[in-house]
Image (cartoon, helix red, strand yellow):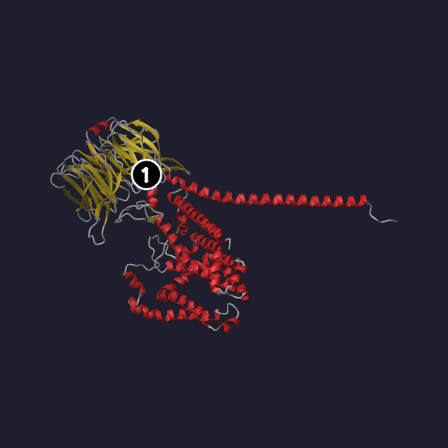
Amino acid sequence: MNDTPTPDHDASTVRQRMAAASARIARLKRLDRAAVLLITLGGIAIIAAVLGILLFIGLEAVPLFRAGRVEPVGTVRVDTAVATAAAEGGLRAVGVDEYQTYVYTVEPDARLVFWSYADGQKVREEPIGALAGARVVSSSRSLLGDFVAVGTDDGRVALLELRFRPVYEGQTQTGVDVQVADRGLVEIDPGKRSVRDLSYREGDGRKTVAAVVADDEIALWWTDENDEPHRATLRPAAGERFTLVRLGHVNDLVAGTSGGKVYHWSLDPEPVLDNVSLVGDGPITALGWALGDNTFIAGTATGTISGWIQARLHEDDERQARVRVHEFAGHRAAVTTVSAAARDKSFVTTGADGSVVLRHLTAQRTIVELPKQPAPVAAAVMSPKNDGIVVVLENGTLSRFSVASPHPETTLRTLFGRVWYEGYPRPEFVWQSTGATDDFESKLSLVPLIFGTIKATVYALLFAIPLGVLGALYTSQFVHPSIRSKIKPTVEIMAALPSVVIGFLAGLWMAGIVERNLVAVIIGIPAIVLSGTSGVVFWGMLPERWQHRLKPGTELLLILPLLVLGGWLAAVLAPWVERAFFGGDLRLWLNSVGFTYDQRNSLVVGLAMGFAVIPIIFTISDDAFTSVPQSLTAASLALGASRWQTAMRIVVPTASPGVFSAVMVGFGRAVGETMIVLMATGNTPVLDWSIFNGMRTLSANIAVEIPEAPVGGTLYRVLFLSAALLFTLTFVLNTIAELIRQRLRDKYKAI
């Protein structure tokens, strides 16, 4: 039988093999396309995720800069006696309960009238029994707690307290119960003159009432801790007359005059005139305290509005001065009322032309301007939750407005500019987000946090860059491969050490050692550098035949003992140096020359965070140095250059793009570090380059503050803005770094 293949058989076999090969090629192409698609989708998903995170962060921060909104709720005509009282110069007290169920007013015929906030209908009347038959000519309401004072035309003042308590059926609130408590009747003026203007405060077991009873006389009445009454009479300078009087706390009193001045008395234990502030040219027509009673706000007949704080401008000043800190856009007519909010530093001002404006003290901004009213405003008040404004006009109209302004204190100025806060001697950058009470003035400057981030990064890189880059250069160019194979993995393992462990050791162990051996640490850094350098010099002085007999890298046997010797000398010399130059205690000496030493300071952060960054810089730099073609180094050595000359003039320039990338990756690691900075510093947001005190970084601040930040609140959104700034900072710097790296790569690619 003939087994020789026929031509047809050969052709068939070839076709089968070609078909199989084509099928394999087609399958490989499909797999390749699928892999490309999968990788592309993965890359797009990563980019989308990063952009989504950035978008989410941005959307959470954007509401900080939204303008306030106001909407009218309704208008109702109240008693016609209102217009009569306004025409006669009577000042009405108006209040709103925190549940926005009632609006209450004081009527000229000695009645408290409660109106429905929802529809403006009269709900209840409560006669002021102690003033039966008297005519009310003035009244006032305290900001915190519904304490009301009612003054008559015969020199008497009735003191009242209103209590609003919710009524529940099961878990549902069905209404609000109102109770009116009598707090006493005061004969403020024995001469029975009319009480022109009035202010009442109660707190700390004391009551205080101040009333203008004549052009040149304020009658002051108060009780002490034993409930014993006291009286005093306050008078202005010759030729001036009082227009308004306002109590702040129970120990401060301000009074406006027709000459544009505001008198300020301290009332504890007896009235003492502290300051006289010249507010403007026209008479003081409106006066009030911002929340916390540290700043008074004055409005004049010319429409100007200003805020005045009390501060000690110089450390050696015996007394605090009143300083005009805030200037606001004025009204086009006389300012008629100033009413502060009960939850923040917002306040409402009204004008004789019917204008009503909501402002914020610290931000020094106009939050929202209400529609112009058809008549002059007799009184205005914000609801206790800052979500509504009630305006009473002199024609007897009561208008209600809903207000939405969740973040009135945030502007570019308060976030990034100097602000003059209450009690501060000058405008400053301050981060202090929370306080014990609502009286606290939020201080949300991000400048100290940005500065702290830069400061921590700089000190960490000052420690990490020399050790990381030079260590990588030495390991890649001078150490024997057998030794290098052990060094690099060891350093890379250091990168796996958790940040929280490094921060824990730095804060609880290293900080104490540095504090006890501060001088030794300061001396030891240059001493170790010099001793290590001297080891290299000594090695170079050895005979060449000795150097050639030893493996590259054995010079460490000479350098390491010298490093230990440098550290030992620093420890030995430190006590002598401290006694000779710093009076025996460097920390006390630093305090005496104006420096603050904190146990957890920038020095500790630099050492700890540098330890965390070194492995990253070392690894990437080592890869860059070892990637330099051997032909370049061999050519340099063949031309007679030494190993150090070759390393510095050939290897370093050629590997500079990679080294720069290593530094920038280390920079990114340092900028975003949280736990080390959080645990190894005092987290004090200060603007000071001193290495002996701490800082607070953006990332650490987010970690510290986020547990205390209510979702959707101002602090919550400012923290998101901090995250956006951190992202932007790293993105911009990395972009610049990439441009520089590309230029370096283009410059040295032809070598």
Residue 742 in the image, given as x and y percentages of width and height: 48, 50
Vertical side of 483 occupied by 192: above or below: above
The residue at which mark 1 appears reads as: 384
Position of 658 with respect to 419 (left or right) is right
User: Which residue is rendered at x = 53% and y = 61% of the image?
Assistant: 635
Q: Which residue is more in the foreground, 677 or 150? A: 677
Q: Amino acid at mark 1?
A: Pro
Q: Which residue is more in the foreground, 146 or 28? A: 28
Residue 328 in the image, given as x and y percentages of width and height: 27, 38
**Residue 264, picture quadrant:** top left
Q: Residue furthest front?
A: 639
Vertical side of 340 occupied by 4: above or below: below
Residue 93 in the image, given as x and y percentages of width and height: 25, 34
Residue 20 in the image, given as x and y percentages of width and height: 72, 45
Q: Which residue is more in the foreground, 551 or 26? A: 551
Vertical side of 350 occupied by 744: above or below: below
Position of 64 with respect to 312 (left or right) is right
Could you tell me if residue 201 is visible in this image? yes
Position of 241 with respect to 537 (left or right) is left
How many other residues sit within 10 Å of disc 1, few (<14), some (14-19) or many (≥20)?
many
Q: Residue furthest right?
A: 1
